[in-house]
Image (spheres, rainbow, N blue to C red):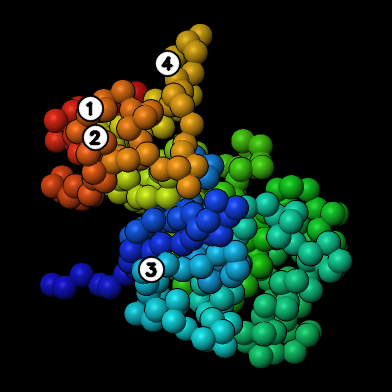
Amino acid sequence: MTAAAPILSVERLSVEFLTDRGWATVVDDVSFDVARGETLGLVGESGSGKTVTSLAIMQLVPMPPGRFSGGRILFEGTDLVELPEKGLQRVRGNEIAMVFQESMTSLNPAFTIGDQIAEAVRVHRGIGRRPALDRAVEVLDLVGIPSPRERVHAYPHEFSGGMRQRAAIAMALACEPKLLIADEPTTALDVTVQAQVLTLLRELQQRFGMAMLFITHNLGVVADICDRVAVMYAGQIVEVAGVDALFQAPGHPYTEGLLQAMPQLGRRGEPLAVVPGVPPMPWAMPAGCRFHPRCAYAEPACTAGPPKLDTTRPGQASRCARSASITLRGSD
């Protein structure tokens, strides 16, 4: 039986930005798939290329100073990189929607919440203002905003942080997209509201049957909501695995470092573990493995050449030349 084609396939994607040091590659030869109904977590430190990857999928990378230097982004078989602007307008906000990282900056302070949600519905569904506003009330109710018929006329500054995030999710879901990209949607929220937003996203995903690309630096969130994980470092995918496999037996030292840096209840009183060093600048990547200056397992061979993704472990890939010879610790 042939497996169903993924709804999204990112194939060898590379994105560059023009800097005062010349062109710098910030997303380098990135490939991953998202299956229908699946949640793929895209994980890594700040500056690893996660958000640029998501903006590239949405074709929102500013050009200039950015440019695509290679690769394809296939959504249901259509290459979004080659799609003309009119075609992109039909896809963005309709079939692919995005919840941006900071709701206060992604919502326009000059317009009401209802008008901002209704605009997307009017554009993509071709309906009038009143039916579109009714749809805005429906989705605000769906995401748990109290008194949605009154709140639909409120401005973003009248909402709390958690309510603004729910409103941003409502805007993204108004046209019932097939794929939702959530760029760190819980970063600025307290723990209680974060748990509520994650529960909401799970429930809405099941209700609409949509796929989700969930971008975060928080592996605790990954364990809660994702099916598979792609770990990014210095613009590259360094590991891809199912959630359980990644937490039990990571295949890349960087993943091990991220797991060990998670707060653990059993380590009360112990200092938090850290990944030593800092990520490299895009214009000054180290030779060979990009993680080797920070890696406790590095050997001289790690600088010889860029390692390829090792796919010998079933369902798991790792960009580490030593993945077959070292045993890494998972989460405790």
Residue that appears at 23% across and 49% down:
309
Q: Position of residue 233 (x, y in %)?
A: 41, 43
Q: Secondary structure at mark 4?
A: helix
Position of the C terminus by quadrant: top left
**How many numbered tags mark residues here?**
4
Nearest the eye: 266 or 20: 20
Distance CA(mark 1)–CA(mark 3) = 31 Å
Numbered circle sitting on residue 70: 3
The residue identified by callout 1 is 299
Q: Amino acid at mark 4?
A: Gly
Q: Secondary structure at mark 2?
A: helix
Query: Horizontally, is 305 left or right of 107 in the view?
Result: left
Q: Quadrant of residue 141?
A: bottom right
The residue identified by callout 2 is 302
Q: Secondary structure at mark 1?
A: loop
Question: Which of label 4 and label 2 is nearer to you?
Answer: 2
The residue identified by callout 4 is 266
Numbered circle sitting on residue 189: none
State yes or no: discs 2 and 1 in contact (Cβ < 8 Å): yes
Residue that appears at 45% across and 77% down:
80
Nearest the eye: 54 or 292: 292
Distance CA(mark 2)–CA(mark 1) = 5 Å
**From what the image shows, is residue 161 above or below residue 272?**
below
Position of the N terminus by quadrant: bottom left
Q: Position of residue 161 (x, y in %)?
A: 74, 47
Query: Horizontally, is 137 left or right of 169 in the view?
Result: right
